[in-house]
Structures are given as C-alpha cells and as structure tokens.
Image (cartoon, grey):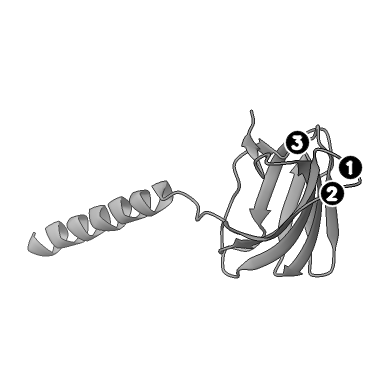
C-alpha cells in the first residue's frame, strides 16, 4: 500500500512539474543597438542597426517595424515570416526582408537547444521605435 501511494505521489509530482514547465513563457530575444544615423539626403529618415540574440526556444510576438528591415543571420537558425508571405528557415549567411507595411507574424529561433543571432539594418523615421506590437 505504501509503495502504491509513493508511486501515485511521484506520478503527480511529475505531472505537476511537466504542467509548470509547459506554462513557462518562451525566452525573450535580447536586442542591442549598434548604430543610429540620420540620413541627411533623406530628411526625416534614419538608419538603425541592431543585433538580435535568440536564446534556445525564443519566440517574438507579432509586430511590425514601420521600416525597411534587412536581416542577416550570423549564427544558428531562425524562422521568419510576414503576413501573406512564405515562412522561411534561415541559416548563417542568409537574408530576409520586411517592408514598412509588413506584419511580422513569425519570428523565432528554429532550435530549442542552440542560440541564434542576427543583425537587422532598418531604414525608418527619425526617432521611430524599432518595433510596435501588431495583431
């Protein structure tokens, strides 16, 4: 009887532990600004370069940039997609483009075990945020 109770408790603890782990939010990306430079030839516009580090399992919320965004993968692999477009998996050396009217619906690390890193070159309005939430 005691063995049966111990097994039941162990099974419940395993179930609860799995449920708690499943509820953990995905790790967030770490964004670092590299450069921001006004484009004097294009009044009201600036370039901003950022790096994005995706921990294993990182997922971006749906968003938009209101900018021309040029992505270049440095390490790992990432999955990208915009509303109405094709979802792609990118490896180091590959690129992705988002236009000012695109809604970025898929952005995530393709791996649950390895980090990924990419650089983004944005052409946007002076002082505009790098991204804004979208639905």
Which is nearer the eye, 48 or 86? 48
* Residue 26, placed above or below residue 3: above
The answer to the question of whether label 2 and label 1 lie on touching residues, with beta carbons closer than 8 A, is yes
Q: Quadrant of the N terminus?
A: bottom left
Mark before the other along the chain sequence, 1 or 3: 1
Judged from this view, the residue extending furthest toward the top is 135
Residue of label 1 = 42
As drawn, the label of residue 66 is 3
User: Left or right: where does residue 41 sit relative to residue 118?
Assistant: right
Q: In the image, what residue occupies the spot 63% across and 63% down?
A: 111
Q: Residue furthest left?
A: 2
Q: Which residue is mark 2?
A: 39
Q: Secondary structure at mark 2?
A: loop
Q: Position of residue 82 (x, y in %)?
A: 78, 39
Mark 3–mark 2 contact, CB under 8 Å? no
Q: Is label 1 or label 3 in front? A: 1
Label 3: which secondary element: loop
Q: Nearer the viewer, residue 102 or 79?
A: 102
Residue 40 % position (x, y): 86, 47
Q: How many marks?
A: 3
Task: Judge the density around disc 1: few (<14), some (14-19), many (≥20) Cα neighbours within 10 Å.
Answer: few
Taking 72 as reference, is 111 left or right?
left
Query: Mark 2 and mark 1: span between their CA atoms?
Result: 5 Å
CA–CA distance between discs 3 and 2?
17 Å
Q: Check disc 2: other Cα within 10 Å, few if <14, some if 14-19, many if 20+.
A: some
């Amino acid at each position: 009887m005691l063995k049966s109770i111990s097994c039941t408790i162990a099974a419940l603890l395993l179930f609860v532990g799995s449920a708690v782990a499943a509820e953990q939010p995905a790790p967030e990306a770490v964004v670092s600004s590299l450069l921001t430079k006004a484009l004097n030839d294009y009044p009201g516009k600036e370039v901003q370069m950022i790096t994005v580090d995706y921990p294993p399992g990182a997922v971006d919320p749906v968003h938009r940039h209101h900018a021309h965004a040029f992505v270049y993968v440095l390490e790992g692999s990432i999955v990208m997609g915009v509303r109405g477009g094709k979802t792609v998996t990118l490896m180091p050396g590959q690129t992705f483009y988002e236009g000012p009217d695109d809604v970025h619906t898929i952005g995530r690390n393709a791996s649950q075990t390895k980090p990924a890193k990419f650089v983004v070159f944005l052409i946007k309005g002076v002082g505009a945020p790098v991204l804004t939430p979208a639905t």
